[in-house]
Amino acid sequence: MSIIRDRIKVIIFGTDSRGGKLFDVVLIITIILSIITVLLDSVAEYSQRYETLFNNAEWIFTILFTIEYLLRIYCIRLPTSYIFSFFGIIDFLALIPTYLSMILPGAEVLTVIRVLRVLRVFRVLKLVQFMGEADLLMKAMLASRRKIFVFLFSVMNVVIILGSVMYLIEGEVAGFTSIPRSIYWAIVTLTTVGYGDISPMTNLGQSIAALIMIIGYSIIAIPTGIVTSEINFMSKEPEKIECIVCGDENQNDDSKFCSSCGSKLTNQK
């Protein structure tokens, strides 16, 4: 029985075998088809014309994903390591709306949650090692979160001050009816979005607006530089063994089981 569970785990969580690669391809195709079904079902014309087809397709996808969800729980040593993981919760949320629609009246509105299935593609791509760069980017963003927070805090100070100044200069005639609305204008201008719903009318106000635009262009590269420096630093770190179940990469070379979830390491280098 343990041999069967290990075999299922390698196929579902890993991609070293031919069966694992085939499973990932089939899973990606199924996820994409289910997302297309959800999107088309939200169009009133298609929903009315192909209601039966969409319902049948949704139940087929839900049953397939349910079987996959149960197999993931069955084949790992500690089921809670998957159930309460990020992707485990995503998998559960992608399943529950269809079943709730049978029990609770009006629960059909929750079917929009099924769009979360698109996030499962990232897990599959990660397992086939197409998203190693995404992991590196995420770690770099987490490592630089304090610097980014300080940067965002400084930007907020700038927009609050300049927004308040514009409120004093332009006033209600130009649409700057309050300080919060003026801050909103400063944020829109600083990010170079420029909706045009509010615009300064005086020469001084237009000069300040031009200054904010220049500041906006100059600060765009700052967070990019912060994250890039962290990426360059982390890319030089030696690679470690990754657990195919929980994704923890801090495993020792001689470890047989994951120190985080307890699953057997089947992808040792």
Image (cartoon, rainbow, N blue to C red):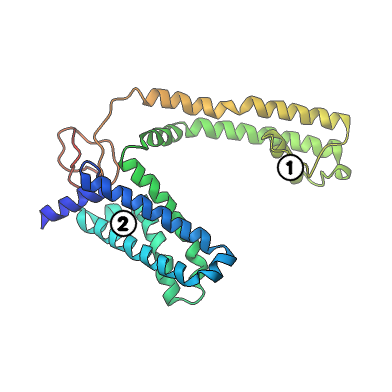
Q: Name the spot of residue 84 as percent of width and height, x first.
A: 33, 55
Q: Residue at x 45, y 60 (%)?
A: 114
Residue corresponding to mark 2? 83
Q: Name the spot of residue 15 as percent of width and height, x first.
A: 25, 43
Relative to 19, residue 70 above or below? below
Relative to 222, residue 25 above or below? below
Asked if residue 135 lies left or right of residue 145, the reply is left
Residue type pointed to by label 2: Ile
Is residue 209 in view?
yes
Q: Nearer the viewer, residue 219 or 147?
A: 219
Q: Residue 133 sits in which quadrant?
A: top left
Q: Residue at x 88, y 29 (%)?
A: 203
Relative to 176, residue 204 above or below? above
Q: Secondary structure at mark 2?
A: helix
Residue corresponding to mark 1? 195
Q: Nearer the viewer, residue 206 or 108?
A: 108
Quarter of the image where the C terminus is located = top left
Q: Residue at x 38, y 50 (%)?
A: 120
Residue 8's tag is none
Q: Name the spot of residue 147 as percent of width and height, x first.
A: 51, 30
Q: Secondary structure at mark 1?
A: loop
Of labels 1 and 2, earlier in sequence is 2
Residue type pointed to by label 1: Tyr
